[in-house]
Image (tube, grey):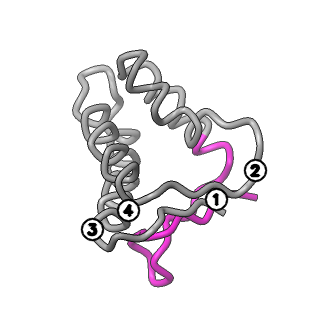
Amino acid sequence: MGWNISHGSNQYGEERRSYTTISNLGKHLENCLSGSDWRKIKPLFGRSSGDPKSVGPREAGQIAGILRTAACNRRMPADWGLEALAFASAADRAASAGEPWTWS
């Protein structure tokens, strides 16, 4: 099982990742971000349930910036940095379109 995240880059306009991948990315993000920034994205990347989640366009834009910061951090492994950038791009697309960024 996994997440279908809107505004992604695949042929369905999604980013599809397993729950395990999101959990592992969350651990790397937590290690690379300030406590304040981590708390802002923890509802998405530090979740213990598979319940659908949606964030508004403004919040998606803020999350995109946080993810880009983490992706460029020297403590972020390169492959996980690319994952963070993929999510940042999806969040940016949602924000630019003025649409909610949905996780289901």
* Above or below, comparing residue 78 to residue 27 in the picture: below
* Above or below, comparing residue 87 to residue 16 in the picture: above
Residue 50's tag is 2
Q: Are marks 4 and 3 in contact (CB under 8 Å)?
A: no
Three-letter amino acid code of the residue under disc 2: Gly
In primary-sequence order, the first of circles 1 and 4 is: 1
Task: Where is residue 93? Give x, y as percent.
Answer: 32, 67
In primary-sequence order, the first of circles 2 and 1 is: 1
In primary-sequence order, the first of circles 4 and 2 is: 2
Q: Are marks 3 and 2 in contact (CB under 8 Å)?
A: no
Q: CA distance from mark 4 to mark 3?
A: 10 Å
Q: Is residue 65 left or right of residue 22?
A: left
In primary-sequence order, the first of circles 3 and 1 is: 1
Task: Where is residue 92? Give x, y as percent.
Answer: 30, 59
Three-letter amino acid code of the residue under disc 1: Trp
Residue 96's tag is 3
Residue 90's tag is 4
Q: Are marks 2 and 1 in contact (CB under 8 Å)?
A: yes
What segment is highlighted magenta in the picture?
1-22
**Quadrant hosting residue 2:** bottom right
Q: Secondary structure at mark 1?
A: strand
Between circles 3 and 1, the one closer to the viewer is 3
Task: Where is residue 6? Give x, y as percent.
Answer: 50, 68
Q: Are marks 3 and 1 in contact (CB under 8 Å)?
A: no
Q: Secondary structure at mark 4?
A: helix
Q: CA distance from mark 2 to mark 1?
A: 8 Å
Q: Secondary structure at mark 2?
A: loop
